[in-house]
Every structure is written in structure tokens, then in C-alpha cells.
Image: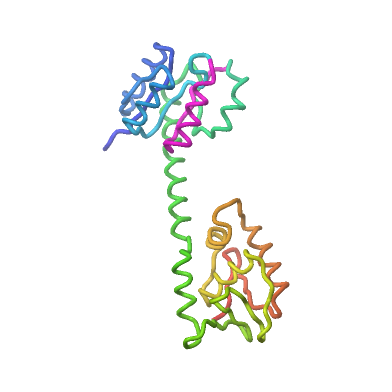
């Protein structure tokens, strides 16, 4: 079994050595021990560790927090803060960097191992969720191909519901020949539904396609559907309870 690589960033030599010994006893590979942020950045770039332990008050300053910000922005590696009870004044700053855990000095070897394992597990779950979201994304090019395949003969017209049609050449929706004025998001969501007639569009798919992951929630989708239904002449958008919405084929 491959050992998880760890970098220790701690300016107290005794604490650093104790961490190194404890980590090795629990089967970790300590690839670097650093006593300052600059050295740590170099070692992180070289070794690409699985997790980093950072003294929150590195060199009695905010260097530990600043290093954590760099790791989060540049490397996407889980990090854990090493802190003491006297660090309360900077904990609020540390929280903003969203660490994967805290280890309190003097540390307990068992708690150290448990904290690292939880950090690695949390990081893995986050990555799997990102992959799940990516698999739900509807590629805009594929959506256009789906719409194109549903058009009537050679015309850029895609009929749906009863007496509705989508003109894919101008991205406009019509009911009995009369244009329905929709917002950009309403139009995007309706195109998503029409491209997949008879298939449920999940909340996740809607959020990622319409909002492109910018702060949308399931309630955002529900509100959008409510507004869209008020603009459509008939109730063609159906609920798939707890999952999403669809238009019958």
C-alpha cells in the first residue's frame, strides 16, 4: 500500500521532530520538514504531498495562514493547522482559509492520525462530488446537437408541448406563433428541457447549465420554474418530485 506523503511546516524543532516520529510510526512518508513559508512553497512544488501540516502562528506571525492561502489557491492540497490554546486571536483569520482540520499542541499521536485520515477522506469526498457534478454537466455543443436533431425537416423549428415551438436559429420560444418574452436564464432552462423531452432534468443539471455553478441552489431552480410557468400559456413543465423537471415528449 502506497504511503501518504506529508510535509510538516513548523518552526519549533522539537515539535517538528515529534511530528515526524509520530507520522512515520503511523505509516506516513514525511517528505519534507520546513521551518518557514518560503522553504515550504519550494518543497510543496517539488514533492506534491497528499497533506500538509502547518503551524498556524509560523515564526510568531501570520505566515502560516498566508501559506495556507497560497496552498488553497495554487496547489489544491488538503492542509491541517497546528495550533495552541493561545492562538485564539488569529483563529478567526484561519477559518477563512477553510482548513481540513486542527491539531492542538501538545498533540496526541492518536488524534494526529485520526485528524489526517479525516482530512484525506474529506478531500476525497469533495473530489468525487466534483466529478459527479462534472458528469452531470450538459455540454452546450451537445445540447445544440440534440436540439438540431429534433427540428422539423430542414427548418430550425423544434416543436414541443402543444402549440409551442423553439426557433433554434434565433433562440426564441413561440406559442401559437406568438413570441414569448423570456429572460436569459428562463430561455436556457427551457432549451435544456426541450433538448431532452421526456427525460428528467435534475436540479444539478439545471444549476450547472443555467448558472454555471455560480451560487445557485435548488430553490434558485424552483424560483426560475415558477417564473417560467407564469409566462407559459399552459402547464407543460412537469415535476419529478425531489429530482427535477421535464416536458413530456
> Where is residue 173 drawn, in percent x and y?
62, 77
Horizontally, residue 158 falls left or right of residue 237, namely left
Report the residue that reaches farthest toward the right.
230
Q: Is residue 68 magenta?
A: yes
Picture coordinates of residue 84 (x, y %)? Answer: 54, 17
Magenta segment includes 23? no
Residues in magenta, as a range:
61-85
Position of residue 60 relative to residue 26, above or below, is above
Give the vertical position of 5 relative to 82 (above or below).
below
- Could you say which is closer to the camera, residue 131 or residue 62? 62
Displayed quadrant of residue 170:
bottom right
Picture residue at 37% right of the left edge, 29% below the top: 44
Name the residue furthest front.
170
Q: Is residue 108 left or right of residue 221?
A: left
- In percent of width and height, residue 24 lies at 31, 24
Query: Split into 4 quadrants, where in the image is the C terminus?
Result: bottom right
Identify the residue at image location x=45%, y=56%.
Answer: 134
Q: Residue at x 50, y 21 (%)?
A: 63
Residue 243 in the image: above or below residue 1: below
- How many numbered tags mark residues here? 0
Which residue is most to the left? 1
* Residue 88 occupies quadrant: top right
Q: Is 156 on the left-hand or right-hand side of 15?
A: right
Q: Quadrant of residue 157?
A: bottom right
Q: Residue at x 45, y 20 (%)?
A: 108
Amino acid at each position: 500500500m502506497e504511503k501518504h506523503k506529508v510535509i510538516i511546516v513548523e518552526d519549533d524543532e522539537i515539535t517538528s521532530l515529534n511530528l515526524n516520529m509520530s507520522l512515520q510510526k503511523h505509516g506516513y512518508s514525511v517528505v519534507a520538514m520546513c521551518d518557514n513559508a518560503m522553504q515550504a512553497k519550494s518543497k510543496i512544488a517539488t514533492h506534491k504531498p497528499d497533506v500538509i501540516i502547518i503551524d498556524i502562528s509560523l515564526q510568531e506571525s501570520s505566515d502560516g495562514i498566508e501559506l495556507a492561502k497560497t496552498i488553497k489557491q495554487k496547489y489544491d492540497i488538503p492542509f491541517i493547522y497546528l495550533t495552541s490554546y493561545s492562538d485564539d486571536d488569529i483563529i478567526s483569520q484561519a477559518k477563512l482559509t477553510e482548513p481540513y482540520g486542527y491539531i492542538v499542541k501538545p498533540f496526541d499521536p492518536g488524534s494526529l492520525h485520526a485528524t489526517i485520515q479525516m482530512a484525506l477522506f474529506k478531500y476525497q469526498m469533495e473530489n468525487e462530488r466534483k466529478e459527479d457534478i462534472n458528469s452531470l454537466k450538459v455540454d452546450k455543443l451537445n445540447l445544440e446537437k440534440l436540439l438540431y436533431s429534433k427540428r422539423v425537416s430542414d427548418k430550425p423549428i423544434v416543436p414541443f408541448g402543444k402549440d409551442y415551438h423553439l426557433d433554434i436559429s434565433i433562440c426564441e420560444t413561440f406559442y401559437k406563433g406568438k413570441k414569448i418574452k423570456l429572460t436569459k436564464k428562463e430561455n436556457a432552462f427551457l432549451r435544456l428541457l426541450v433538448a431532452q423531452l421526456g427525460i428528467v432534468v435534475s436540479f444539478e443539471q439545471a444549476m450547472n447549465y443555467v448558472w454555471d455553478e455560480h451560487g445557485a441552489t435548488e430553490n434558485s431552480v424552483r424560483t426560475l420554474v415558477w417564473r417560467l410557468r407564469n409566462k407559459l400559456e399552459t402547464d407543460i413543465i412537469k415535476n419529478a418530485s425531489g429530482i427535477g423537471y421535464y416536458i413530456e415528449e
